[in-house]
């Protein structure tokens, strides 16, 4: 009897691709440092939104807290187990539908989600939503007693990692709910009840947590109202498309994206056995760009290509639907699937191989060995002793010293992004008030007149510094200034 080694072809690439993003070779990125800091705040008894500002939903904070509890490799272990679980579930789905190369779509999922240019290693919110998107997609076509409850559960997890990432799942939720409903109303009620119950299983504990910790108001304002009121920006359609095309090429997602869409459309024309499912999948691929169309960040030049991470789930699943339900032999045979897979994956493979060859040079947080930081290392800092202003990269210092920031405002992009941000001066005033209250010893300041749209904010901040702090003389020239509290300063 011929042995099937296809499981190894899934597990080994998954583990190898995870290993090149382990703590030994971690990619530095400011968002990840911010998320690590939120885990530290929870570890020290703080509450999200009340004790730090962030506009992400809360599950990213809790997973970083759990990772911190498990040690320096904790988050990587959690991340690897999640990726491996999604990969195996996808592989099992491919095997159940008798794909000629059942290992191919799961391997493509790993190549896309472990693309260092897009993923920045591990730990981004959209990485986790891509994992649960893929699991939810597989649930849509599988029969299970608790299918709709599990779909609701997955939807809740996605929503509380990154709200807009529910949009790529929406076509499949509609398909699962309305497909084969006999009799219509009782089936819809049962399915809807399962979805709602699953979603509430995630939602209710989160709401209770913030309610009991007197942070429900902050949770609503920061994770929801902020995103609707500030973080959405309309741009012309052609600017979105131009930016997406450029950055897709930069991260080597272009071939697999265009190729998969062409194959999906060809399968639709040539008689796919599940046309509505295929239409849902094509729609889901397009909805994977929802973050860019809502925020416009790529089109204004912010190269936040982690917006492409949902494609790691939607594109391999589209290929699965093409292969599993094809009405054309050219998509069903082993040899043809191998050729398609090789063509679609070659750029991704070379991209990751080039990164892996240079792994030692990728380690660490960049050039932070400047005189100011060497000085700070000797000061035996404790909670609230240091405040980093206007450089999110240096949030890493809070994590390195395991100390809390004196202010909840741990990053400051918005003063420079939005004309009407902090119109009543409440945020900038709260920062100076907190620095005085905690008698913060050091301020690492990166601000200049470009930092603020409102120059009154800049003048207020500099006046506060000069009145309460004195610059620490340094031999090197850098863009930062380290300020030390004056004797009697902050009173």
Image: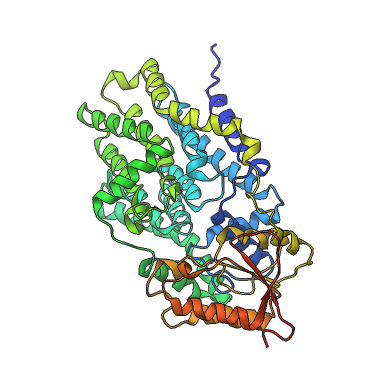
Q: Is residue 272 visible?
A: no
Residue 254 falls in image quadrant: top left
Q: Is residue 450 above or below residue 36?
A: below
The location of residue 414, given as percent across then percent down, is 45, 68
**Quadrant including the N terminus:** top right
- 303 to the left or right of 435: left
Residue 40 falls in image quadrant: bottom right
**Quadrant including the C terminus:** bottom right
- 263 to the left or right of 301: left
- 477 to the left or right of 149: right
- Which residue is the extreme one toward the bottom? 491
Question: What scheme was used to colour the molecule?
Answer: rainbow
The structure residue drawn at horizontal position 68% and vertical position 41%, both measured from the top left corner, is 24
Q: Is residue 169 above or below residue 54?
A: above
The location of residue 362, given as percent across then percent down, is 61, 41
Q: Is residue 119 above or below residue 32?
A: above
Q: Is residue 447 above or below residue 300?
A: below
The location of residue 167, given as percent across then percent down, is 35, 53
- Which residue is the extreme one toward the left? 269
Residue 487 falls in image quadrant: bottom right
């Amino acid at each position: 009897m011929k042995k099937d080694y296809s499981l190894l072809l899934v597990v080994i690439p998954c583990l190898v691709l995870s290993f090149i993003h382990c703590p030994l070779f971690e990619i530095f990125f400011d968002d990840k440092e911010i998320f690590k800091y939120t885990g530290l705040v929870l570890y020290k008894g703080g509450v999200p939104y009340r004790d730090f500002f962030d506009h992400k939903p809360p599950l990213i904070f809790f997973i970083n807290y759990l990772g911190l509890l498990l040690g320096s490799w904790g988050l990587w272990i959690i991340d690897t187990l999640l990726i491996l679980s999604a990969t195996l579930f996808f592989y099992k789905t491919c095997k159940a539908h008798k794909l000629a190369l059942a290992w191919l779509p799961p391997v493509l999922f790993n190549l896309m989600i472990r693309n260092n240019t897009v993923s920045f290693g591990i730990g981004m919110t959209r990485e986790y939503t891509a994992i649960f998107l893929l699991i939810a997609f597989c649930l849509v076509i599988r029969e299970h007693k608790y299918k709709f409850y599990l779909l609701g559960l997955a939807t809740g997890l996605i929503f509380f990692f990154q709200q807009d990432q529910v949009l790529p799942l929406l076509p499949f939720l509609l398909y699962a709910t309305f497909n084969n409903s006999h009799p219509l109303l009782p089936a819809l009620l049962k399915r809807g009840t399962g979805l709602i119950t699953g979603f509430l299983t995630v939602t209710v504990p989160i709401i209770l947590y913030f309610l009991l910790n007197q942070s429900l108001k902050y949770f609503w304002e920061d994770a929801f109202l902020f995103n609707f009121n500030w973080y959405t920006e309309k741009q012309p359609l052609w600017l979105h498309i131009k930016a997406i095309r450029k950055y897709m090429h930069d991260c080597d997602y272009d071939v697999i994206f265009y190729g998969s869409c062409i194959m999906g459309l060809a399968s639709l024309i040539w008689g796919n056995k599940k046309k509505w499912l295929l239409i849902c999948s094509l729609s889901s691929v397009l909805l994977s760009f929802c973050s860019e169309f809502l925020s416009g960040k790529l089109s204004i030049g912010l190269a936040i290509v982690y917006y492409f991470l949902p494609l790691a789930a939607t594109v391999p699943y589209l290929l699965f639907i093409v292969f599993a339900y094809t009405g054309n032999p050219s998509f069903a045979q082993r040899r043809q699937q191998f050729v398609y897979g090789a063509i679609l994956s070659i750029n991704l493979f070379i991209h990751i191989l080039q990164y892996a060859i240079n792994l030692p040079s990728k380690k660490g947080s960049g050039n932070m060995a400047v005189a100011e930081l060497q000085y700070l290392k000797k000061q035996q800092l404790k909670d609230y002793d240091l405040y980093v202003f206007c450089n999110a990269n240096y949030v890493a210092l809070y994590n390195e010293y395991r100390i809390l920031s004196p202010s909840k405002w741990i990053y400051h992009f918005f003063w420079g992004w939005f004309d009407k941000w902090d119109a009543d001066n409440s945020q900038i005033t709260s920062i100076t008030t907190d620095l005085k209250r905690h008698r913060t010893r050091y301020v690492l300041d990166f601000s200049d007149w470009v930092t603020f749209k409102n120059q009154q904010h800049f003048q207020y901040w500099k006046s506060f510094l000069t009145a309460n702090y004195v610059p620490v003389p340094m031999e090197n020239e850098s863009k930062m200034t380290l300020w030390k509290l004056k004797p009697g300063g902050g009173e």
